[in-house]
Image: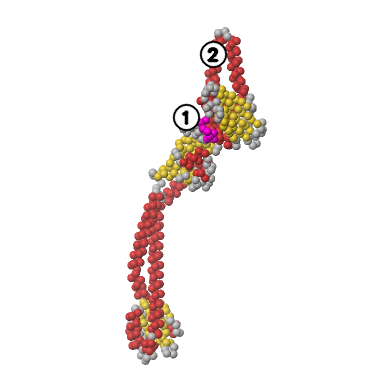
Amino acid sequence: MKLKGTRPSVARQVLALQAAVVVVLLLAGATLVYLEARRGAETKATAEVTGLAVSLAALPEVREAIGADDPGPKLRGVADAVGDAAGVDFIVFMDTDRTRYTHPNPEQVGKSYIGTVAPALEGRVHTEEYTGTLGPSVRAIAPIRDANGEVAALVSVGILQQNIGGELRRRLPQLLGLATLMLLVSAAGTWAINRRLHRQTLGLGPAEITRMYQLHDAILHSVRSGLVVVDDGRVVLANDEALRLLDLPEDYEGRAVEELGLTGSVADLLATGRPAEDELHVHRELVLVVNQRPALKGGRTLGTLATFRDRTELQALTGELDSVRGFAEALRAQAHESSNRLHSMVTMIELGHAERAVEFATTELATAQQLVDGIVSRVSEPALAALLLGKAYQAGEKGIEFTVEGGTADGGGIEPRDLITLAGNLIDNALDAAAAGGAPRRVTVSIDQDASGLTLRVGDSGPGPATDRPEEMFERGWSTKADDRPHGRGLGLALVRQVIDRYGGTVAVDTEPGTVFTVRLPRPEGTPEP
């Protein structure tokens, strides 16, 4: 499925957004720096003109000139000398009625001063931004006092606004150069981030990523098999079916396999990450078919992917089918033997030995009836009785002595399917063990039932299991059979353990001589006593 569209990828959109943000931030920063620098220049200019005006107002030469009949010539000399030295644009001395004594433009001398003078007339230094004859300026007006302390004249010192920004304009190319350098560095970083993001998102756009996530989520919720992805010993993904089959907690993500309550071979398989193909594993009450392999993408290993399929019902039906098939094979063998015996009886009659033929037939019938009566009289559960009868026929075909002992049993409230799984697997193992041992070959089944529960004991005359740890016999995969199906062996006793655990029972194994399995299942609650 092709998901790429014509819209820009996430990486390209992020690149454009980052570039726009960087440009806006740089422009805003440069503007703020410019405004702050201009404000600083104006503050500095205000301080300069204020200090100069106060200083001029206190000069003895200025006070002396103010007291003369014509103060203009002397004040013009002071204004020109100080103005050139201080770098201000104008120094205007004036009378208290605003009449100018000095001005950079000689034509303005004798005319009225343009600006605010009321604070200075009151004896205070005043600063302002004002547009006069020379243009907008920052100016300070200070009072000049006579010998009696009265305000006798005023002095105004100013710097034009255009000259205040001159220094700033001279520094502006440096500021623009620095901003351009920062823009280039930011662009390079943004491009590098874009490249990395482009690789991580595979060049997909937002719509494609959303669509991919929706498909991914729909598949996880819809697939009938359990899916689990494990990376570095931690579960990173599990679908709904896996949560159900493995009984995983909702907060499984990121947790180690050992922390999720998994047991037995399933936990070992997920923790080790070894490859598995169609392996049967028993997990709690379920029989699962498990496949596991590395999850690869573009040559990279993303962990291991395990799939689980529920085979519990199928396994139970397979066990019942095997029992029925074994029973059918036993009946076939019995039919074959019956045919041979019938031919023998007919031949004896033809040879004139009718009495011997009747005696032979009676003996065979009594033997068969004794086997059936012996099982049916002890076991009233039809499924279990049929299983034991079939196993008896199988044992007879293999030349194994099969004996059913004990009292009577109706199943003790145990489900017939579980009884077949329990007894069938134990008896099958016993028959195989007895067939592998020397003479005499025997299998003994004992069933006892009382008010507290059911006891099943299966013994054989075989060589015994090749292990000194009986508990490991109930683990999936343990087997002594030379079977060419490496993943189909060692499941029988694991299923037996499953049934025992389900009913809260116990099992004991005695390996000398032969092997004897003793299973005790308590009567389920609510089951009437026999």
**Rendered view: 439 above or below 208:** above
**Rendered view: 89 above or below 379:** below
CB-based contact (under 8 Å), mark 1 and mark 2: no
Quarter of the image for the N terminus: give it. top left
Image-quadrant location for residue 339: top right
Helix, strand or loop at label 1? It is loop
Residue that badge 1 annotates? 483
Can I make out residue 367 in this image? Answer: yes
Can I make out residue 217 in this image? Answer: no
Q: Residue at x 36, y 59 (%)?
A: 185
Residue that badge 2 annotates? 343
Identify the magenta region: 465-474
* Rendering coords of residue 316 (x, y %): 54, 32
Q: Is residue 508 left or right of residue 279?
A: right
Of labels 1 and 2, earlier in sequence is 2
* Rendering coords of residue 253 (x, y %): 49, 47
Amino acid under disc 2? His
